[in-house]
Structures are given as structure tokens and as C-alpha cells.
Image: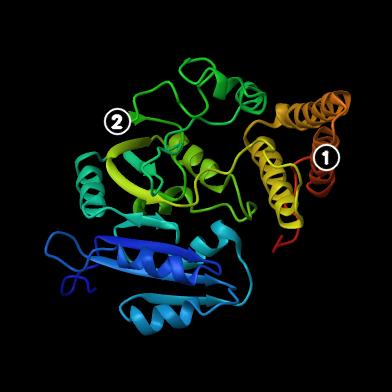
Amino acid sequence: MRAREGALPDISILIVSFNTCSILRDCLKSIPRPSGDITLEVVVIDNGSRDDSLAMVRSEFPWVKTIQSEINLGFGGANNRAYHEATGHYIVLLNSDAFLEPDSLLISFQKMEANPTVGLAGAQLVGRDGTLQPSARMFPTLLREFLTMSGLAHRFAHSKFFGQNDRTWADPDTEAEVDWVPGAYSIIRRDVLEKVGFFDPAFFLYCEEVDLCLRIQKAGYKIMYWPSIKVVHIGGESSRQVKTLEVSRSGSQLILWRMRSTLLFFRKHKGYSTAAICLLEIVWYRLRAIRKILKGTPAGQVEAVTFRKCAQLMEQAWRETNGGRVSPPQPW
């Protein structure tokens, strides 16, 4: 997949892989072969995987640039490293569990060329069964976090007030200027990244794309949701609520990482409300635990343990980040 003779590629696609050999293969297969419409390069960075991801890429997709990291750099850190190897005029972030529809890249390129005030844009994300995923979102605030955690956002999804966080009230087939879009797929102007920087290395996982979109917006560029760009995404959306009866070790780790990043984001951009978001989560989880205990059922007792654990994890995240002021040593 070569650039035009003597020219830089139109698009550089960055893919971070972490033990995703099989699904990464499907992801790379979804990338169109070279054509006269646009020129591409693909950069895959392996984030300390223990499977044969990198060997598979080098064997089956020799046109892909590969980078091997001996440690897990996190989503933002890995993309930052891949960015240094990329030469395209536009940067496309693509999750290893996301698959492009045939015209996704061409439409992305054409729309960015036609809209120079857009700094970053995202696609309509759907599951393999066609189920819509949150694809156009608003910046987190204390109110929006409460609406999501309480379940009110889900219960009144068609309300502009209650459904504001994920814009669940909006027509998913209508393009719109939004606050941020998920990192499963986005296209970004290189010159914008050169102005505002790429991902903040403080965020190991979670909130890195929210922070980037906010910085791009502050620089005077628009963040757009373009539903004419279709991307199939297996991963789906990580829930802000506890939906299982038990929190596994790996699940606890991800919850802790999410809490750390939430505190880091609020301290960086909304300093006055960092303690409030921490207190909101702790109180909410402890109240949920009490409610489950009062139910007096075996399942309720198990759920109470889960909610108490979540409250403890937020207390731990507060200590480890010094109230959102410092990022713990990485890899988390």
C-alpha cells in the first residue's frame, strides 16, 4: 500500500494491538487495497502482547508498518509512538476490534477536505448485529455523570436533558457538531495535532480521547459526528455502571483505571469539581450497597459487596492520583 510517487500518503491509519491476533487480522482485511482515490499507510503497534499478533501482521500483511513495544504503553501512549512513524496528511485511529465499511476512508477524506474548520471527526459505530453504539458524545460534567450512574439517562433516553451525555435523543443518522467521539474510529488533521499535541501521556487508558477533543475544540476547531462513515465495532461501550454480580480481578483493574482517568480529567479541566465527582461516586456506590443489603436476598448480598468494592476503588484512585493531580507510574 504505497503512497503516490514522491508524495506523502493522504491517510495514516494507526492501530494498537494487545493480544488481539485473530481479530486484528479481520481489522486489517477490512482496510481497502490501494486505489487512485486516496493513498494510505497503516501502522500497527503491538502493545506488549503475549500472542503472535506481530508475527501474523508481518507474515500476512507485509505492506503494514509494525512497531513492537515490550511493555503496555496504554492506548494513548501507543498511539503517540505510532504517530512518530506516520507520515500521512490525516491520522486515522482505528481499534483492532473495529472494521471499516468499503467507503469509510474515502468519505472521511473527502469530508475533511471539504470542511477545513473540522479538526477531528468520528463515524457511526455499530455492532456486528447492526446495533447502534454511542458515537457522538458530550464532555463529562458532574450532572452528566450523575444522570448516567443513576440510570436516568437510560430510562429517559429520548429526553434532551436526561440523554445529553450520549445524545441519545438525537437522530443517529444526522451529522452534528459534538464534544467528542470514541477512539474506536476517528480522523484527525495532522496540522491540528502539531498545534495541540497528540494524546496526553498522563492518561494510560480512558479519557484520553475526551481530553484530546477538548484541546482541539479550545484551539478553535470543530469536532464532528459524520454518520455517513460506517464502522463496525465489536468492543462496544464500557459501561459506567456495575452490571455483573461479581467484580473480577481484571474488571476491578479496569474500573480503577477508569476512576483514575476520570479524576485526572476533572482536575485538568474542571479543577473545582474533582472532589465532587469523587464524592458522588463513593456515596452513590455505598448507597447502592445499603439498598442491596436491605433486600435481604443472596444475590443482593453479592451485589452489595461489588458496590462497596467500587467505592473502595474510587477512594484508592483518589489517593493514588493525589486527587487527580498526578498520574501513577505506568504501565498501570
Any mark on residue 164, and which? none
Q: What kind of residue is marked 1? A: Val
Q: Which quadrant is the C terminus positioned in?
A: bottom right
User: Measured along the vertical axis of the image, is residue 63 above or below residue 310?
Assistant: below
Classify residue 110 as left or right of residue 117: left
Q: Position of residue 157 (x, y in %)?
A: 50, 21
Q: What kind of residue is marked 2? A: Asp
Circle 1 is placed at which residue position? 302
At x 43%, y 63%, the residue is 15
Q: Position of residue 153 (x, y in %)?
A: 56, 22
Q: Position of residue 276 (x, y in %)?
A: 76, 26
Furthest-front residue in this view: 297
Q: Position of residue 269 (x, y in %)?
A: 62, 35
Task: Give the distance between the C-alpha atoms of the residues marked 1 and 2, in whole angstroms.
Answer: 41 Å
At x 13%, y 59%, the residue is 37
Q: Does the image show residue 86?
A: no
The 10 Å Cα crowd at callout 1, few under 14, some 14 to 19, many 20 or more, is: some
At x 75%, y 60%, the residue is 329
User: Measured along the vertical axis of the image, is residue 244 above or below residue 48?
Assistant: above
Quadrant housing residue 242: top right
Please tell me how many numbered marks the rendered image carries. Answer: 2
Circle 2 is placed at which residue position? 173
Q: Earlier in the sequence, mark 1 or mark 2?
A: 2
